[in-house]
Amino acid sequence: MKVMIRRSPEAGLSIYVPKKDLEERIVESEHETLWGGWIRLTNGWVLDLPEMASDTPLPITVNAKRIGGDGDER
Protein backbone atom coordinates (compact mmCIF):
# COMPACT_ATOMS: atom_id res chain seq x y z
CA MET A 1 0.00 0.00 0.00
CA LYS A 2 1.13 3.55 -0.64
CA VAL A 3 1.93 5.52 2.50
CA MET A 4 3.35 8.96 3.17
CA ILE A 5 5.90 9.35 5.95
CA ARG A 6 6.66 12.75 7.41
CA ARG A 7 8.28 14.36 10.45
CA SER A 8 6.67 17.14 12.46
CA PRO A 9 8.07 19.00 15.47
CA GLU A 10 5.01 18.21 17.63
CA ALA A 11 4.34 14.56 16.76
CA GLY A 12 7.69 13.27 15.53
CA LEU A 13 7.41 10.68 12.76
CA SER A 14 3.95 9.97 11.41
CA ILE A 15 2.45 8.02 8.56
CA TYR A 16 -0.60 8.71 6.39
CA VAL A 17 -2.44 5.94 4.50
CA PRO A 18 -4.62 7.64 1.86
CA LYS A 19 -6.80 4.62 0.98
CA LYS A 20 -7.78 4.23 4.65
CA ASP A 21 -7.77 7.99 5.39
CA LEU A 22 -5.61 7.06 8.36
CA GLU A 23 -2.91 9.11 10.06
CA GLU A 24 -0.94 7.59 12.94
CA ARG A 25 2.32 8.25 14.77
CA ILE A 26 5.23 5.84 14.39
CA VAL A 27 5.98 4.60 17.91
CA GLU A 28 8.63 1.92 17.27
CA SER A 29 10.94 0.85 14.46
CA GLU A 30 13.22 -2.10 13.85
CA HIS A 31 16.09 0.12 12.72
CA GLU A 32 17.10 3.57 13.95
CA THR A 33 17.30 4.75 10.34
CA LEU A 34 13.66 3.63 9.73
CA TRP A 35 14.27 1.99 6.36
CA GLY A 36 14.46 -1.71 5.49
CA GLY A 37 12.57 -3.05 8.47
CA TRP A 38 9.28 -2.90 10.34
CA ILE A 39 7.59 0.01 12.05
CA ARG A 40 4.77 -0.04 14.62
CA LEU A 41 2.01 2.59 14.60
CA THR A 42 -0.05 3.92 17.51
CA ASN A 43 -3.06 1.87 16.32
CA GLY A 44 -1.03 -1.38 16.54
CA TRP A 45 -0.37 -1.89 12.84
CA VAL A 46 3.07 -3.21 11.87
CA LEU A 47 4.33 -2.21 8.42
CA ASP A 48 7.40 -3.33 6.49
CA LEU A 49 9.26 -0.44 4.83
CA PRO A 50 11.55 -0.66 1.78
CA GLU A 51 15.35 -0.31 1.90
CA MET A 52 16.35 3.29 1.34
CA ALA A 53 19.32 5.49 2.15
CA SER A 54 19.41 6.62 5.79
CA ASP A 55 19.48 10.27 4.69
CA THR A 56 16.34 10.01 2.52
CA PRO A 57 14.51 13.36 2.85
CA LEU A 58 10.99 13.48 4.33
CA PRO A 59 8.13 13.74 3.52
CA ILE A 60 8.15 10.82 1.11
CA THR A 61 5.59 8.41 -0.36
CA VAL A 62 6.63 4.74 -0.43
CA ASN A 63 5.12 1.30 -0.84
CA ALA A 64 4.78 -0.44 2.53
CA LYS A 65 3.43 -3.88 3.36
CA ARG A 66 1.24 -4.52 6.37
CA ILE A 67 2.71 -7.51 8.22
CA GLY A 68 0.77 -7.48 11.45
CA GLY A 69 -1.05 -5.68 14.16
CA ASP A 70 -4.55 -5.81 15.49
CA GLY A 71 -5.60 -2.28 14.68
CA ASP A 72 -8.86 -1.19 13.10
CA GLU A 73 -9.49 -2.81 9.70
CA ARG A 74 -11.66 0.06 8.40
Image (spheres, rainbow, N blue to C red):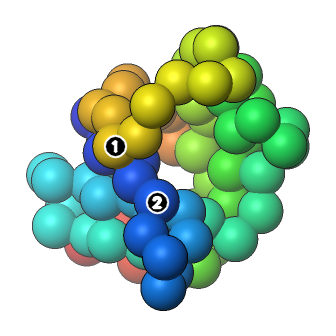
Left or right? Give the position of 54 relative to 11.
right
Q: Residue at x 62, y 34 (%)?
A: 48
Q: Residues within 10 Å of mark 2 (few under 14, many from 20)?
A: some
Q: Horizontally, is 24 left or right of 46 in the view? A: left
- The mark total stands at 2
Q: Position of residue 16 (x, y in %)?
A: 30, 58
- Point out the residue furthest to the right here: 31
Q: What is the x, y in percent for residue 49?
A: 58, 30
Residue type, mark 1 in image: Pro
**Above-or-below relation of 47 to 25:** above
Q: Position of residue 46 (x, y in %)?
A: 64, 53
* Residue 54 found in image quarter: top right
Say the numbered circle drawn on residue 7: 2
- Residue 3 falls left or right of residue 20: right
Q: Label for residue 69?
A: none
Q: Which mark is residue 59?
A: 1
Query: Distance between the Cα atoms at labels 1 and 2?
Result: 7 Å
> What residue is shown at x 46% (from left), y 60% (from top)?
7
Give the residue type that dot 2 points to.
Arg
